[in-house]
Image (cartoon, rainbow, N blue to C red):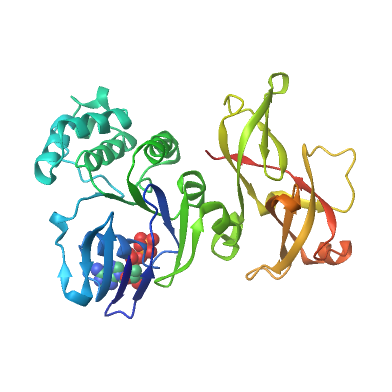
Amino acid sequence: MHLKLERAGGFRLDIALDLPATGITALFGPSGCGKTTVLRCVAGLERAREAHVEIAGQCWQDSTRGHFMPTWQRPLGYVFQESSLFPHLDVQRNLTYGMRRRGGSAQALDEAVDLLGIGPLLPRRIESLSGGERQRVAIARALATQPRLLLLDEPLSALDAARRQEVLPWLERLRDQARIPMLYVSHSSDEVARLADTLALVEDGRVHACGPVARVLEHASDALREDAGVLLHGQVESVDAAWHLACIRFGGGQLWLPDPGRPPGQAVRVRVLARDVSIALSAPEGTSVQNLLPAVVERIEPVAYQAAQVLVHLRCGQVAEGGAALLARITARATHQLGLAAGLRVWAQVKAAALVG
Ligand SMILES: Nc1ncnc2c1ncn2[C@@H]1O[C@H](COP(=O)(O)OP(=O)(O)OP(=O)(O)O)[C@@H](O)[C@H]1O
């Protein structure tokens, strides 16, 4: 899709995006950069001056030939920050109402109810549900209309941390099992690391970077600031039951983490923040840090907003086979004292790593 739009206040949107046929593409960026505007244009709620929107082979808008499909004809599902369900109706009637308005089949409805695990909620009135349950119902209602694209605009942002944790596994399930592309707007890098397959970084109405989530996160330090770091795709190798730790193998070696209770062989995502990684020139002894990885310095970049610190890009594992990237945020003085430079072999000490999916 390609969208161009100008607003009276001076905001300009100029976005080109190719969505994969399945999985979640996250739009991530600071407030006001245009994320919601992208969704609104894709939905036809706002008309971009120049636009080409084609979803699953169907053209929704092509400004070169004056074609604009109205929102109600676009086979899409839209989930907002706060669910737009009818509070006085029960879940079942909310779902069937959505289907009558936008089409869908009883089978699709059953599948959506099953996928979001809301069967037991069907007779409940919306006003009796928790925020997380409401969002699951809102997603199921969108899915039941068999959309070709699902738009999710910060679906968790109105929820408290506990409710967010409750809904996240259902969104993972949706990502892994629903066979439709999803555009997911988020402010939260945790959510993006956990859910996204593809990440588009949006800045000032433009896509600054777009690609597989791990690759884009590695180069998004300016946008992520304190959350700068890497996302590692790995799998559970073994479990040390006596110490409640699990060994996660990834392209750069292995990491010990608190045992998430996953069986060996299961694929997992691990996030390592740059601020949790330090560097030593030789293998440290007598340290409490459990994860020491041999690595090579690739490059050192300044931290734009913090002159005392730098970001060291490391590669660990078998470099010839690609290895895995790691970022360490340390002081510029330490870099100088250790004589760090591209090509130097070092030890990365990973103080904390979090399993995010
Ligand atoms: N209805 C409107 N009329 C005029 N300007 C608008 C309107 N809606 C949004 N804007 C402006 O358009 C720009 C993009 O807004 P948009 O809501 O798309 O950003 P966003 O990245 O989704 O922000 P947030 O993360 O805060 O929701 C902002 O400068 C905003 O002030």
Q: Which residue is at a point 79% across and 56% down the rendered structure image?
A: 296
**Residue 131 is at least partly visible in this image:** yes
**Residue 79 is at least partly visible in this image:** no
Q: Which residue is at a point 15% across and 63% down the rendered structure image?
A: 69
Residues 7 and 265: in front is 265
Extreme top residue here? Answer: 242
Residues 171 and 129: in front is 171
Displayed-image quarter of ligand 1: bottom left
Percent x, y of residue 239: 67, 24
Q: Which residue is at a point 57% across and 56% down the rendered structure image?
A: 215
Q: Quadrant of the N terminus?
A: bottom left
Q: Which residue is at a point 33% across and 81% down the rendered structure image?
A: 10
The number of numbered badges drawn on the structure is 0
Percent x, y of residue 269: 57, 41
Q: Would residue 143 appear left or right of 220 to someone viewing this image? A: left
Extreme left residue here? Answer: 100
Percent x, y of residue 104: 15, 39
* Residue 143, image quadrant: top left
Residues 169 and 211: in front is 211
* Residue 108, image quadrant: top left
Percent x, y of residue 151: 30, 52
